[in-house]
Image: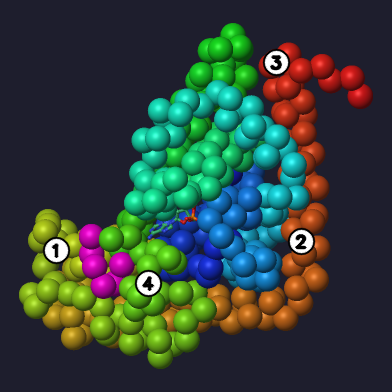
Amino acid sequence: KPRVFSGVQPSGGLTLGNYLGALKRFVEAQDSGTETIYCIVDLHAITVWQDPAKLTHATRELAAGFMAAGIDPARSILFNQSQVSAHAEMAWVFNCVARMGWLNRMTQFKDKAGKNRENASVGLFAYPSLMAADIMAYHATHVPVGEDQKQHLELTRDIAIKFNHDYGVDFFPVVEPVIEGVATRVMSLRDGTKKMSKSDSSDMSRINLTDDADTIAQKFRKARTDPEPLPEAVAGLEGRAEARNLVNIYAALADTTPAAVLAEYGGQGFGAFKPALADLAVAKLSPLSAEMARLMDDPAEIDRHLGAGAERAAAIAHPILERMFEIVGMVRSR
Ligand code: TYM
């Protein structure tokens, strides 16, 4: 039976990239009737320094973002990772399954550690083992993510295969990454070759879900583009990374295809397209940010949802964790 799992880090606010590449698709999976489990990965967030008060705030704000986007805590399981100890316990075993060489190849580690690797946290290096545990603690079969998580999911598959092989079992399913749609890699508004990211030093490079209408309009107006009008067909976007990105964003927000967007706007300049894009983004995002703000007025209620979600998550993960310990040969006597 299919079971969807995915996670988002509570490290700073949500961007349009997180929304289109992840949250919006999480809601679609939930609404299709599949079992869906969504996790706010606070243990992952602290692999780089997080101010404690900001981490608390970001966790609640992310939970509010999930719910405002349409995640229903009754139909999906929504919780924060540190409240379900199975994640950390299973990750330890996976640290003993994964090889140094595998983790050494992870581009996210190389990017985040930067030049001074000696000073990166051990947790940042072991990050993918914890991510594998997130997924496998639920025997999840499908993991919707943006393009940037592809390498981590391949590692998750490698860990599952090696565990099953080493212990001679067929215990962990080998997961399918679900990297689908036009918005799996939303790019920076300042540089069409870089992904839109909450950690980019320029706030003009991204749309934050908390931006107001004027800010959103201004960011799209100032978005980098080339001087040519939009092409009539998708093939004409070749070599025009910034134009492609704006067309993809429009298509994702409008639930249509890039071809349909170009059928409408092909031949027109960005002077006409950018305001239309900004209007669409404001129409889609402002109800969402208003609902987020409303939910944030009652943090205790958010915490109750996360606690209830964690209990339901633990009820699934705990038996799987126990079985894994038995397979490994740990004595379980209580
Ligand atoms: P994180 O928190 O960086 O991002 C959350 C989700 O948003 C997607 N995303 C994007 N999609 C399209 N365009 C963008 N510019 C963009 N930026 C971010 C990410 O691909 C992701 O799907 N390691 C994960 C969190 C994680 C996880 C897991 C995911 C922990 N355990 C288990 C799946 C399953 C991360 O850092 O995502």
As measured in the structure, the alpha-carbon distance from the residue carrying label 4 to the one carrying label 1 is 24 Å
Disc 3 residue type (three-letter): Ile
As measured in the structure, the alpha-carbon distance from the residue carrying label 4 to the one carrying label 2 is 33 Å
Q: Nearer the viewer, mark 3 or mark 2?
A: 3
Disc 2 residue type (three-letter): His
SS class, disc 2: helix
Q: Residue at x 79, y 39 (%)?
A: 315
- Magenta residues span 188-193
Residue 262: horizontal and vertical position, in percent? 19, 68
Question: Contact (CB < 8 A) between labels 3 and 4?
Answer: no
Q: How is the image coloured?
A: rainbow
Regarding residue 333, the answer to whether it shows in the image is yes
- Give 267 or 123, whichever is nearer the viewer: 123
Q: Is residue 10 above or below residue 135?
A: below
Q: Label 2, on which residue?
A: 305
| Mark 4 closeness class: few <14, some 14–19, many ≥20 residues within 10 Å | few
As measured in the structure, the alpha-carbon distance from the residue carrying label 2 to the one carrying label 1 is 44 Å
Q: Is residue 65 above or below residue 137?
A: below
Majority SS type along the magenta span: loop
Residue 7: horizontal and vertical position, in percent? 56, 50
Whether residue 28 is in magenta: the answer is no
Q: Is residue 2 above or below residue 258?
A: above
Q: From the viewer's perspective, tell me whether residue 250 is left or right of residue 285.
A: left
Q: Nearer the viewer, mark 4 or mark 2?
A: 4
Among the two numbered marks 4 and 2 on one chain, the one whose residue lies closer to the N terminus: 4
Q: Which mark is residue 240?
A: 1
Q: Label 3, on which residue?
A: 327
Q: Label 4, on which residue?
A: 201
Question: Contact (CB < 8 A) between labels 3 and 2?
Answer: no
Disc 4 residue type (three-letter): Ser
Q: Which mark is residue 261?
A: none
As measured in the structure, the alpha-carbon distance from the residue carrying label 1 to the one carrying label 3 is 52 Å
